Image: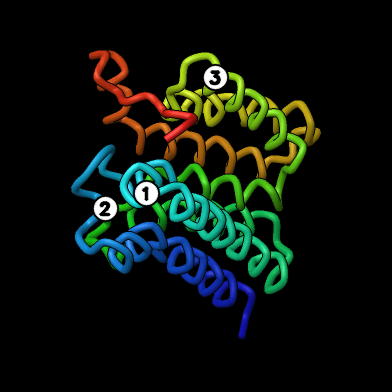
Amino acid sequence: MNHMMRSLLVVIAAYLIGSIPFGYLIVRKKLGGDIRETGSGGTGATNVSRRAGKAAGVLTLLLDAAKGSAAVLIAKTMTGDEWVIAFAAIAALVGHIFPVWLGFRGGKGVATGVGIFLVLAPVALLCAGAIFAGVVAVTRYVSLASITAAALIPAFVWLLSDGLWPLLVATVVGAMLIIFAHRGNIRRLVEGTEPKFRFKQ
């Protein structure tokens, strides 16, 4: 198998791995119904937590992060090509946000992005995570924290990676995807109708 074919298969596999709708499946199994019809309309950990409890939310978070890590680790193992790894990372995020199994309507990509950048840029992820925690602590808006962290992680990658272009491209495109997926949250934040996260339930 030549490099181009292997690279294409790796990117397709990354998309399909990203498309696995763990939050949807967990809620479907536990409560029935479609998690996308309640709350923020996403399949991610925050919405699952609101609908099915903290344990279900944490499980969703871990599984969504794991699939992001798995996609880029497979790309690293199969090709070692930095651009293929970058495209695999983007494909995994696209898969989570636009999953083929759910009519291309999935989650917001935050946990999957965490899994991806845990492998590709752990120090930049740590910096973005600190920003995320600070925004949640001050505002109690998980969506605002997610948007802020996503917007800033390309800057952290640029500062910490010596301008490694494939990683920077993956980070910028990933940030754009995550922010786009939060467009409904942005509208609700502007309107003042976005629900706040409750630390104790």
CB under 8 Å between discs 1 and 3: no
* Alpha carbon distance from label 2 to label 1: 7 Å
User: Can you identify the residue that label 2 sits on?
Assistant: 35
User: Can you identify the residue that label 1 sits on?
Assistant: 48
Query: Which of the two residues, 197 or 170, is positioned nearer the viewer here?
Result: 197
Q: Which mark is residue 135?
A: 3
Residue 152 relative to residue 12: left or right: right
Q: Position of residue 131 (x, y in %)?
A: 62, 23
Residue at (69% x, 48% y) in the render: 118
Residue that protrudes farthest toward the front in the picture: 201
Q: Residues within 10 Å of mark 1 (few under 14, many from 20)?
A: many
Residue at (68% x, 40% y) in the render: 165
Q: Secondary structure at mark 3?
A: helix
Above or below: residue 60 compared with residue 50: below
Residue that protrudes farthest toward the bottom in the picture: 1
Query: Which of the two residues, 70 or 62, is positioned nearer the viewer here?
Result: 62
Residue 36 relative to residue 197: left or right: left
Which amino acid is tagged 1? Val
Which amino acid is tagged 2? Ile
Which amino acid is tagged 3? Val
Q: Position of residue 140 (x, y in %)?
A: 46, 21
CB under 8 Å between discs 2 and 1: yes
Mark closest to the chain's N terminus, 2 or 1: 2
Above or below: residue 156 compared with residue 178: above
